[in-house]
Amino acid sequence: MPMRLPIYVLACLAPVLAAAGPAQGAADFHKHIRPLLETYCFDCHADGVNKGNVAFDEFASDQAAVDNRDLWLRAFKMLRAGLMPPAKKPHPSTHERAQVLHWIKRDVFAIDPANPNPGRVTLRRLNRVEYRNTIHDLLGVDFDALSEFPPDDTGFGFDNIGQVLTLPPMLLEKYLTAADEIMTKVQENWTHPGGHEHFFPRATPTDDAARREYARQLLEAFAGKAFRRPVEPDTLERLVNLAEATYRQPGKTFEAGVAEAMIAVLASPHFLFHEEAAEPANPRQHYAFVDQFSLASRLSYFLWSSMPDDELLHLAASGSLRKDLATQVERMLKDPRSDRLVRNFTGQWLRGRDIETVPSEARFILAREEKASADFEPNRRRLRELRDKNKDQLTQPEREELSRLRAEFRRRLEERVPGELTGELRRAMRRETEMVFSFVLHQDRPLLELLDSDYTFLNEPLARQYGLTNVLGPEMRLVRLPPGSPRGGVLTEGTVLVTTSNPTRTSPVKRGAFILENILGTPVPPPPPNLPPLEDAAKGLTNHTPTLRETLALHRQNSLCASCHNRMDPLGLAFENFNALGMWRTTEFQQPLDTAGQLITGESFTNPNELKQLLLKDHAGDFYRTLTEKFLTYALGRGLEYYDVETVDQIVARIQKSGGRSSALLAGIIESAPFEKIQNPSVPTGLGKEESHSP
Amino acid sequence: MNSLLSSHTWQQPQSFNRRQFLRGLGACIALPAFGSLAPLKALAGTSPAALATTASGAPLRTAFIYFPNGAIPAAWWPEGEEANFQLNHTLKPLERFRQRLQILSGLDHRNAMAGPDGGGDHARANGTFLTGVRVKKSATDIRAAISIDQVIARHVGRLTRFPSLELTCDPGRNAGSCDSGYSCAYQYNLAWSSPTTPMAPEANPRQVFERLFGAGEPKQRAEDLKRRRQQERSILDCVLQDARQMQGRLSSPDRDKLDQYLTGVRDVETRIQRAETLGDGKDPRCEAPSGIPPTYAEHIQIMFDMLVLAFQTDSTRVATLLLAHDGSNRSFTDIGVPEGHHELSHHFQDPEKIRKVAEIDLWYVKQLARFLEKMDQTRDADGQSLLHNSMLVYGGGNADGNAHTHVNLPIILAGAGGGTLTPGRYLKFGSQPASNLFLSLADRMGLTGLERFGDSTARLTQV
């Protein structure tokens, strides 16, 4: 596997750090790292000051410092993201910074860049999306797993995380019912022209033994596909017995018997779980390659959210998949099934799954931008007052007033609001998000086009929502954006703008938090449990409805809130020109919107386009890393661990070297140690190896 | 809208009138719902503390219904105490049932408080509600405890075809993460069969119905159930051996996952055996609901209907229903509240926002009132109402949604527990673990030897 070290790591492989070892780590800490901490960190993290509960001078010994992995993981992330030291404090040189990062990776995390720890994926079951696709690709039956099965729990932002996916008893019941329903449909298909021959290539023998043999052949082929690896002899024996026991019953056909065994296949743990195995490896090696059938499934569930096809399984069986990997990835990406990767990944990373259902109240959103009719509020109050009165005590004029007000409000409610998020519009938003991502992925475009581009995908209703008039018709297509357009890039797509809003207004906090987590990779911690009340600070603002910017400014006066809101708010407020329906606007409550701000890392901007440019110029690396982390999490089905920083760094370096191409990201993931390898099961004390491994 | 209704004659076929639905439900099932009363009485006579059975020999049921984001305290709590109390704004819809329920104040879930765990009050409110423990703050390593409904189900479950029923009206999940680093499992599940196994609830009323009574036309359903049982039996034999073989090859975290599979297999086997000894449930002889109804109110009501049906046919005696997960940001435009519930619940003392949250609280209580009405109007085997022979907990793990408090939780205990409870009162407990209430309910369900539950300190003797 090609290994490319990030440039700064190479630069750092200075002679002093060459020979690593437990004692060496402590010695290096004393000699090289601690002096740097003294210079740049001790102001806030030593001598009794421990901001954020971090103190760098309270270790019992140099070795104790090395052993505090959690602390260094936090320090590593802060330093790498440029969040520490703070913008106003003296900063270490590039070399010094790299030196600390390298020391953490090698001595604290014990990472061997030539042989990174592949980690451990907990046995995971098919999630409901994978189940549906697998059934479709295996049997040609469309089973609506999304409404039949309970939602899968998510972890680390995705719904395919082995550790998180549970199998409650109710789900097992559903698997049984589903298998029965699916096979009922399959048996129906067998009655259609061609359907039977497709599955039963020859006539059913009449002789008992030959019939049994035929059933065995059919079930061996079917179970081999369904289990994504050859079926074991005794499992096959059981399946054949089941088929035979059924078709021997009076009135039952051979087909019904085979179908019964197929139900058992679909209910088997071999079908429902991603079962993996390792290639034989030297017991002295901690890590082994996954076997070729596992590799076929890892590829297909990553790129297709489904089972491997015949070609992949044949290559796995002949042992030639690993050497044919690049060709296969290329072929798989060209296959329409790769749209499922796009849909599932953007559905979660960019919230495409939420856009179709997120609550949205267009009338109230737009009211913030219009001059509201003066009698709206008084009328509403009066209506409520009359409605709450005892009906019998209403006077005649009151009754008339009530019915007049009722009629008026009903009319108002029935009026279509332009910009309202209809199902059509919501679907178009989702498609836009998917198509932009698909374009970047399939056309091998620069990944930074996800942050800013001069194109997007629109149809007429969505174009109108975005204030563009030259797109006609319902079909989504590639549209070149006019010069200076605020659109282009995921942050100004309807999907992201709407799903990061509240039902009646934008939420700059949610938008800021979204960018920090999903674009910059520096998520804010959850809010403190005891929220300080705003009302005292807001008292001076009774002369007008405070804007969100004003409200948030008040909020930030509290230092408890400021540390995170200083990071979230400017990012979110920059996009205030986009309302909670994803439409462009310039005012709110008859006041012009102010979108200027400053990032916590010091850079200033005045509008969303300038912020995008800042992200491209100064934070491309952060974006590559964040996208890599998200993609890798999704590809592996597990959360990333401290030792994965090396794998991520290697992939990011590869992306940068390629000029930011999406192919480098994809190849980097597929060729990475965690994707290709597994803990070596033949290591006698294999358990927890990743915890105790030292170079 | 749904076919349960369409099989009957309605005065106003256009509108979805709950009262009529109730009548429809009563009409579509023959009463008494199961067997005759005589053997039940004989059964009851054998032991004074019979499992999940009232003194008259009828089944005793318990259900736990969760509503999200707490309730505005000032509008929730009544004036007065004991038998002399006036209901406040939010609980007004329960006026008709005041003699059939108890309003309990001073019950806490201190394990839902932030403590060392920081943010995540919604996840904790939900996760602690029926478990009484501090749930582990982790997105991956979930750890709660067996919930009170499951403790009860373990003891009384063998009496019915289904040990318990888990329902939800909140099938949705947002992409990405849930509350503050907690697994979504805490927020979307009320019932836990073990610290690591949440009991995923069912949201689709059609599936609840078919699970209880079988699929197909009314007359085919019993046959469908029988056929499926036979099939499942032979298939389970086959896959059980697959699973055992696989298990030998796995290391420990993987083995835990496969254990969940094996537990599921055993549960289905047990259910098959029980159905064979107890016989199938009396079929309600109406069409199954067609799916999740278009509006939230309809969804809630039809899930309540499923509860009534399950209790009435004695298919189970233990149930949980999650109306919405804590932190739910649902908007209620129909009652003039377009803002999200969660967003509003952080009202910062804004009177308009407080009013709107109270409107939402009231809306939920109205849904409860409709359920109580059905339970009250449905006759049980002993001639009492289902409500009389039930203990229904309606509440949430958040008290004041604005401040995220977990003491003095809004909790109502409806039903007379077959005569073992003394409804018609507003009880003030000062400050006691809500787990104490659960312990007392478990006693009445006939559990013996349960000394503690969650963070319980004593029993709530006054209820």
Image: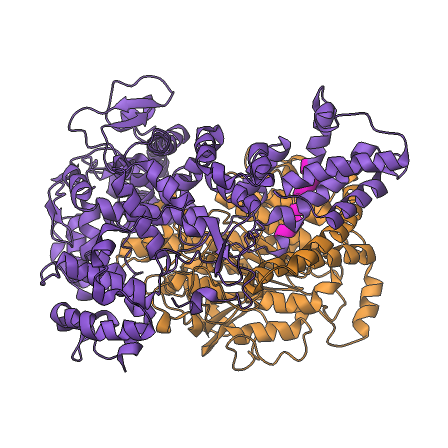
Q: Residue at x 14, y 43 (%)?
A: A595
The answer to which image quadrant residue B40 occupies is bottom right
Residue B421 seen? no
Q: Nearer the viewer, residue B19 or A528?
A: A528
Q: Nearer the viewer, residue A36 or A127?
A: A36
Counting from the top left corner in percent of width and height, residue A480 is at 25, 23
- Quarter holding the C terminus of chain A is bottom left
Q: Would residue A361 be found to the left or right of residue B378 on screen?
A: left
Residue A243 position (above or below residue B63): above
User: Range of the magenta residues?
Assistant: A171-182
Counting from the top left corner in percent of width and height, residue B88 is at 42, 62
> Which chain is rendered purple in the image?
A
Q: Is residue B22 magenta?
A: no
Counting from the top left corner in percent of width and height, residue B402 is at 32, 62
Residue A587 position (above or below residue B200): above
Q: Nearer the viewer, residue B136 or A595?
A: B136
Q: How is the image coloured?
A: by chain
Q: Would residue B23 be found to the left or right of residue A54 on screen?
A: right
Q: Would residue A441 be found to the left or right of residue A609 on screen?
A: right
Q: Main secondary structure of the magenta part?
A: helix
Q: Residue at x 75, y 46 (%)?
A: B283
Q: Residue at x 31, y 64 (%)?
A: A106
Q: Colour of chain B?
A: orange
Q: How many marks?
A: 0
